[in-house]
Amino acid sequence: MRSKFFRSIAVAGLLALAGCSENAGSDLVAQAGELVNPEISSDSEGGELPPNGETDIFSSDDSTLPGESSPSGGEQFTDESSSSSEENSEQGGFSSDNGQQSSSSESVEGQTYAYGWAKGNPPVPTRGCGKQWNRVKSGSYEFKWSGGKRTIRIDIPDNYDNTKPYRLVFGMQCAGGWAGGVQQEGYYGLKPLDTEKTTIFVAPEGNGNWIPWAEADFKLFDELLADLQGNLCIDSSRVFSTGFSYGSMFSNSLAWYHQDVLRAIAAYETAERNIWLPNPRTYKGIGWMGVLGFDDKTCTPEMGRAARDSILISNSVNGQALYEQAEEAAPGGAHKCYDYKTVEDRFPVRWCTQSGGHIWDHKDPYQSESWVPEATWEFITQF
């Protein structure tokens, strides 16, 4: 009965071409009074809150332009795929020798954390370092995973050195889009900014439906990440996910329970509903950047702010950042990016706003180039 209910909503949503419903989120301010993130404050056991939004509900957007837990290690190109997330959990966290995050990590000052890293931490090389990459370096290939096969778009620097750990950035497509569009647009404009060639860019194809991401695709993400880290030299402490519309909702959902393997995400026109969300979620901090157009009728400003607020709870002591008033752009004027002051330094939150609709590449008045790529690149390279 439940599946029929959600299917009926999906059909109705498709006919209406409505991307994000108006279902109200939880009262985050009330929740924050009950939550203490154990990574931010040491005087609490760290309780969990019920997730915001609803699961499996249809969402869409009207654009044709252009998601991580511990790797579950499905069937890969190599027989050296990583252990399952359950095995990692039994070992007390991710060990750096198999390319994943340790259960504790050392900061540049020598302080240790239960998870995560201090800004400026040394690279954490994966077990793929030293291996030969025998697939395409710029283009696409078919990836075999436990759910079948999926096309993967990838761009590896032409001077790739398998002894040097690289930053990894995922680009997630929107509803009605395709991974090729993400690649053609330079992974939301970020690839042209990688002038020092320090980054590997990846765009997995969605599930083939107009709504490209569902619960099963989170396992795809896990297995793809495990495969990439097992065969390429990646800095496992600098893995990021970006996306627009439904792709941003996918990245945002990953931010709810993949904090052990994702350093940060960037979400362009996002929402915290109408996509599969982990239940219960893990209230750990994670770097987060959001871009909001005041005139977006698909993923409305209320939805974008709710997605941001759900992260502010995790990134500050007792959710105090919820009470910090972010400066936003003047209607019709230049964009404004605001960096929150009351979040923990290791888990920054950037909030960028401007008048505009459901697009990712917002531009300032009288400008031909979008400011979004540079604002995002600045954000992810700070780590």
Image (cartoon, rainbow, N blue to C red):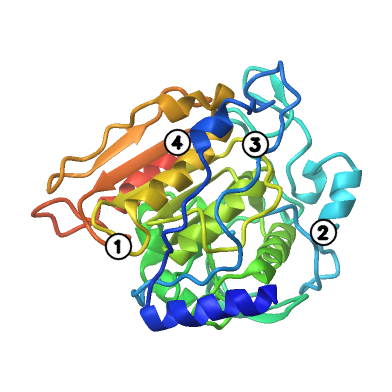
**C-beta proximity under 8 Å, tags 3 and 1:** no
Mark 2 and 4 residues: CB-CB less than 8 Å, in contact? no
Instruction: Tell me which numbered mark, 2 or 4, is placed earlier along the sequence.
Output: 2
Measured in 3D between alpha carbons, the distance from the residue under mark 4 to the one under mark 1, in whole angstroms, is 24 Å
Q: Is residue 63 above or below residue 80?
A: below
Q: Residue furthest left?
A: 366
Q: Residue at x 34, y 56 (%)?
A: 300
**Residue at the spot 38% in from the left edge and 61% down from the top edge:** 188
- Number of the label disc, if any, that sits on residue 284: 3
Q: Nearer the viewer, mark 2 or mark 3?
A: 3
In-front residue for pair 340/34: 34
Q: Which residue is mark 4?
A: 349
Q: CA distance from mark 2 to mark 4?
A: 31 Å
Tag 1: residue type? Lys
Q: Amino acid at mark 2?
A: Ser
Decide if residue 150 is on the left or right side of residue 212: right
Single out the mark in the foreground, 2 or 1. 1
Mark closer to the chain start, 2 or 3? 2
> On the rendered image, what quadrant is the N terminus found in?
bottom right
Answer with mark 3 or mark 1, whichever residue precedes in sequence: 3
Identify the residue at horizontal 20%, vertical 57% (top origin).
369
The tag on residue 82 is 2
Q: Is residue 101 left or right of residue 313?
A: right
Give the CA distance from mark 2 to mark 1.
42 Å
Q: Residue 271 placed where, x, y %?
A: 45, 55
- Image position of 303 with respect to 62: above or below: above
Provide residue 348's location: percent of width, then percent of height.
48, 33
